[in-house]
Image (cartoon, rainbow, N blue to C red):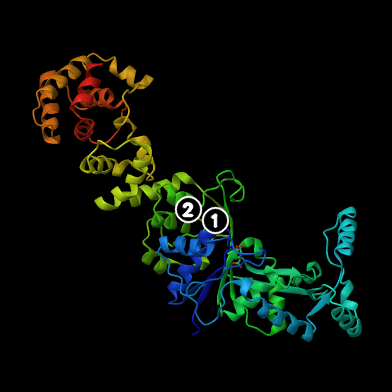
């Protein structure tokens, strides 16, 4: 059997939205499931040049997700170059081959003429379609124009009748009327190929067996199939995937300020959580399993279970996954995740590293993303706490005053400020004030932290320090 080869083919914009990343995940999983290769190809034909650093950025993103790129611009295999702007000669050669075979033709139409055609189309309210004017040029006319260095493009010659079939693993058989296919440009006047041409040439030369890409390319694939047929090349297996929509129901984009992978990463979302969340956007396993390691995903991934309908990015669900993975971090990892956010927001000069570690640890089970540590721990860094209405209501209850006063006494008596001794003080308060459960813990928690919920109370009191706690209990 042929080696399975998939490719991730982003444009080098230095920005990867989560829809792009999801495509990469599917491509990676499919390759690895079949012991195949995952290839990175940079599609930069629409741009004058690469956005600086964006290739390294793509490598970094995939590396953070633990996806190894088997071949790409930074680790070439045998089918390079892996950057389209470095493959211009290749596209030209193949475009000319199609001209030779009669499947493509030179077009010398000026911008002026095309603008007129567009205007007419717009007046008639019909979609613009090139009228095939240059298809009729004689060999002599073409040679004359080439000799005079007239600018030209090369266009694909579409059949005017019949239908073209697209076979897609997700959408099944799709029929496209050839009459709607425009004689599209393959090679532009600047010598660059269009995406519509380059993707076919590259996928063939790079021996790509499975093409996974956005559904917006599905109908276009008729044109690609005609190109494969014209060359006599074998078509890849197509897997078109429905879009991931933003929380507002619109297409994800940088302009809409939608989260990119790096934005999420920089806020303390864990790559494995992002990957786990994304793979389930538009794909589902046979059972209801939700938490997957990469190896389990490789095992379970079945591209025929990719959904036909679009899915919506839901940050709450992502946070649920992330919270799960945060709980699984060891001590070093959780500190590494949270410390930078604390350093950025608070003055930690007079805090010991042990204190900071302890603080982070007690919040591990409360965090849904790393940066959240800042708001959760605010009560340790500000002088005053204010109580909301619910807390104030609670504090009206009869036993509260006695509980607080008793605890204050007990804490004042502590010589050695340890979590154990604080626990002991709370136990004594329970006995002496005759309260238990919620009526014991809640007033204390509210008084020292200003909140009704939080991590272990003795740890919280310990970390706040004797002075602060006594001050808060006295108010
Ligand atoms: N460069 C294209 C994109 O980012 C790739 C589409 C494809 O995978 O063929 O949408």
Residue 146 visible in rendering: yes
Q: Quadrant of ligand 1?
A: bottom right
| Disc 2 residue lies near ligand 1 with CB under 8 A | no
Asked which secondary structure carries label 1, the reply is loop
Task: Please tell me in which quadrant of the rendered image residue 181 appears.
Answer: bottom right
Q: Rounded to the nearest whole Å, what is the CA distance between mark 1 and mark 2?
A: 8 Å
Number of the label disc, if any, that sits on residue 15: 1
Note whether 203 is above or below 265 in the view shown.
below
Q: Position of residue 431 (x, y in %)?
A: 10, 22
Quick one: SS at disc 2?
A: helix
Does label 1 or label 2 sit earlier along the sequence?
A: 1
Q: Which mark is residue 262?
A: 2
* Position of residue 248 measured from the top left corner of the image (x, y, whole percent): 58, 43
Q: Is residue 252 left or right of residue 1?
A: right
Vertical order, 456 against 245 (above or below): above
Label 1 CA crowd tier, 10 Å (few <14, some 14–19, many 20+): many
In the picture provided, is 419 more to the left or to the right than 163?
A: left
Q: Nearer the viewer, residue 195 or 26?
A: 195
Say which of 183 and 440 sits in front: 183
- Residue 146 lies, in percent from the top left, at 84, 80
Q: Pointer 1 and pointer 2: residues touching (CB < 8 Å)? A: yes
**Which residue lies at the image location 20% right of the left edge and 19% below the top edge?**
404
- Residue at 90% over, 78% down: 136
Q: Position of residue 184 (x, y in %)?
A: 77, 70
Q: Is residue 170 visible?
A: no
Q: How many marks?
A: 2
- Please tell me which residue is depicted at 18% across the width and 19% down the height of the picture: 403
Image quadrant holding the C terminus, namely top left
Mark 1 vs ligand 1: CB below 8 Å: no
State whether residue 412 is above or below residue 229: above
Which quadrant of the structure image shows residue 68?
A: bottom left
Figure check: 381 above or below 390: below
């Amino acid at each position: 059997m042929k080696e399975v080869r998939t490719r991730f083919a982003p444009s080098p914009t230095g920005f990867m939205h989560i829809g792009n990343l999801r495509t990469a995940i599917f491509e990676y999983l499919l390759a690895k499931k079949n012991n195949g290769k995952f290839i990175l190809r940079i599609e930069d034909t629409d741009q004058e040049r690469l956005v600086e650093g964006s290739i390294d950025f793509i490598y970094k993103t995939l590396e953070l997700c633990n996806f190894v790129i088997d071949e790409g611009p930074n680790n070439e295999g045998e089918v390079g170059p892996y950057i389209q702007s470095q493959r211009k000669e290749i596209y030209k050669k193949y475009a000319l081959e199609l001209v030779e075979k009669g499947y493509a033709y030179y077009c010398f139409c000026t911008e002026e003429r095309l603008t007129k055609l567009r205007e007419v189309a717009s007046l008639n309210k019909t979609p613009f379609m090139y009228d095939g004017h240059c298809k009729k040029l004689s060999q002599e006319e073409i040679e004359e124009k080439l000799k005079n260095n007239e600018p030209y493009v090369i266009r694909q010659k579409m059949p005017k009748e019949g239908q073209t079939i697209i076979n897609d693993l997700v959408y099944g058989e799709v029929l496209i009327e050839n009459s709607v296919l425009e004689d599209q440009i393959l090679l532009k006047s600047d010598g660059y190929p269009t995406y519509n041409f380059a993707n076919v040439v590259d996928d063939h030369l790079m021996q790509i067996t499975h093409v996974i890409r956005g559904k917006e390319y599905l109908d276009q694939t008729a044109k690609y199939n005609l190109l494969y047929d014209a060359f006599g090349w074998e078509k890849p297996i197509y897997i078109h995937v429905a879009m991931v929509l933003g929380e507002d129901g619109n297409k994800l984009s940088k302009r809409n300020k939608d989260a990119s992978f790096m934005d999420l990463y920089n806020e303390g979302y864990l790559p494995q959580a992002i990957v786990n969340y994304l793979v389930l956007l538009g794909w589902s396993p046979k059972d209801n399993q939700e938490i997957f390691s990469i190896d389990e995903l490789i095992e379970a991934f079945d591209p025929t279970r990719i959904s036909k309908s679009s899915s919506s990015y839901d940050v709450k669900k992502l946070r649920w996954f992330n919270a799960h993975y945060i709980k699984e971090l060891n001590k070093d990892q959780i500190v590494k995740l949270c410390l930078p956010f604390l350093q950025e927001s608070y003055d930690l000069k007079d805090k010991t590293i042990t204190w900071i570690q302890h603080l982070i640890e007690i919040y591990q089970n409360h965090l849904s993303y790393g940066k959240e540590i800042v708001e959760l721990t605010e009560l340790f860094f500000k002088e005053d706490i204010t109580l909301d209405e619910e807390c104030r209501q609670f504090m009206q209850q009869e036993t509260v005053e006695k509980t607080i006063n008793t605890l204050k006494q007990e804490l004042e008596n502590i010589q050695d400020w340890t979590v154990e001794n604080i626990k002991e003080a709370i136990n004594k308060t329970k006995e002496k004030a005759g309260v238990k459960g919620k009526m014991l813990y809640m007033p204390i928690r509210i008084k020292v932290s200003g909140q009704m919920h939080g991590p272990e109370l003795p740890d919280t009191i310990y970390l706040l320090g004797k002075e602060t706690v006594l001050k808060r209990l006295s108010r």
